[in-house]
Amino acid sequence: MKNIIFYLMAAVLLMTACTDDRFVNSEVTGVTLTETAVMLQIGETATVGATIEPAGAKSDVVWSSSDTLIAKVNQFGGITAKGKGTASIIVTTKVGRKVASCAVYVDAIRVTRIELDKAALYMLPGDSATIKAKLFSADPAKAPTDTVVTWTSSDAKVATVSTTGGVKATGFGNATITATSEDGNFKATCLVTVSKISVTGLLLDKSAIEGTFGDEIQLTATILPDNATFPEIIWTSSDSTMVTVSATGLVKFVNKNAGTAVIRATSKDNNIFWKECTVTILKDMSGIVETIVWTGPYTITGWANPLTIAYAKFGNDLKAGDKIRFYFQSLGTNPELQIWYADWSGKIVDVKLAAGSEYYEMELTADIIQKMKKENQAWGDGGLLMQGDGNIVLSKVSVVTTVGPQLEPVADPSYVFFDFDSKGSWWGDCPQTVENDPAYSISGKYFHIKCTASSGWYGLFWRNAGNGLKVSGVTANNWVIKYDINVLGPDIKSFKIRLGDFWYITDVNANLKKWYTYTAPLSGFKNNNGNGTPITDADIAAMGTGGDFGFADGGSGGEYDVLIDNVRFEPK
């Protein structure tokens, strides 16, 4: 029975196989392709057909690629080029597993030329621009595969270029920007011209300044236009022994004598553009006076051993800003010093003295001075008390004060041409008298002028200077005019000195209420009411035979009360 069923099933299978077309003539002996090699560019397509052998044999086939990054194939033999290189397109029969292949050679779409959207660029320093590059293949309809471009500049000091063609003008001159294709090394260039923004002018904020030793005045120069390529300014002083000037225009008065100098600001880019400021250096008549009020030595050995100095020792003319200087010797390391009011009513200073220092200064205020006085302390003679933790030896105590302008002696009486003892003959627009008041006078007579100024320059007094005016050896650059002055009035703001037709304009101190000597450099005298050409040696020599000398004041509506004496020439 089992044998009968087996044979029946075999018969059925045999009948089925004979009627399926896929297995008719099922002996597949091979497969061939219509192409053994295909050459493509990236993006192109091609189709390869497969033939089953022998004729009449049938079988489905499977298509594959050895490298799909180079070429892909679909199940109908359609090939698409994907990347540069070589790949094999393989066909395999399902029946018999027969194989055939086709070599596919894929090449990039090659660059044949490169062009830039700009052949030339004209820029100013600091400007930016962008250059765009375009790559072409042999077929205008096809874009090249490799689009990498390298950018370079022939001179980065003139212009730089980024990896994307961004150009930055960094200096001035010419530079060539080059774009190079990675594929084929094709080049295209753009000439960049960066023009310098030239200086067209220079301004200076001050045309004249004056000061005394130690003063500092800032000058400011402005380059035009404000975007000039080279805005640098060169500062120079005509006489660095009198005034110096920094690279930023800071003028420092470095000489205590009177004189003049010129500060010049010059464009570094174009030295035809410059401006000058005339500097008048006034004689420094200030100073520091130190007066010893107590001498030792005195050893402060502990808190129970203080030193007291009565107020009267310090004098009665103490003022705020004065300093009391305590000279000491330290026997230990950083000893402590305390300064009290003499009646122990308050501690003023508590300080650790620096190792190696020689003195300690205490600056006075109006309040400290008031509390130092005898009448403002509970008992004793007022003053100060010093104590410490030991190891301090006081050697002396002094008062240090800054004094203002001082009266100077006459260097050569023969060059005094107005002293009011023997040389008078004055006239003027205001009441004037020759006086000898012990409250104000230095010695002998002086001239006293009192007037109410008008709105303009108002003459105080004049004299024909041709009678006995000694000018031998006097030169504009090396001599000065000096006079002793005591301003009693409230507010002289501008004072003008006349020497012939030449004027010197300055300020005098209206707050001192004491005699002092004023110095006016002859080189500062100018014609045209003080605004023109400086006086020369020949002009000065002419004063010996004729010419006027005098003073005038710039009116500001105030009353002027001035004492003047000993007008003379002196060398610097």
Image (cartoon, rainbow, N blue to C red):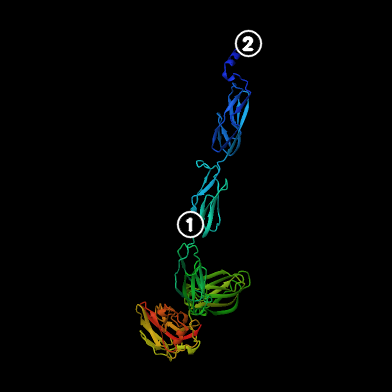
Disc assigned to residue 222: none
Give coordinates of residue 248: x percent, y percent: 51, 68
- Under mark 2, the amino acid is Tyr
Q: 414 above or below 73? A: below
Q: Residues within 10 Å of mark 2 (few under 14, many from 20)?
A: few
Q: Quadrant of residue 389?
A: bottom right
Q: Is residue 369 left or right of residue 50?
A: left
Give coordinates of residue 557: x percent, y percent: 35, 77
Q: 146 above or below 299? A: above
| Residue 47 seen | yes
Q: Earlier in the sequence, mark 1 or mark 2?
A: 2
Q: 33 above or below 484? A: above
Disc assigned to residue 122: 1
Q: Is residue 33 left or right of residue 237?
A: right
Give coordinates of residue 347: x percent, y percent: 52, 70
Q: Secondary structure at mark 2?
A: helix
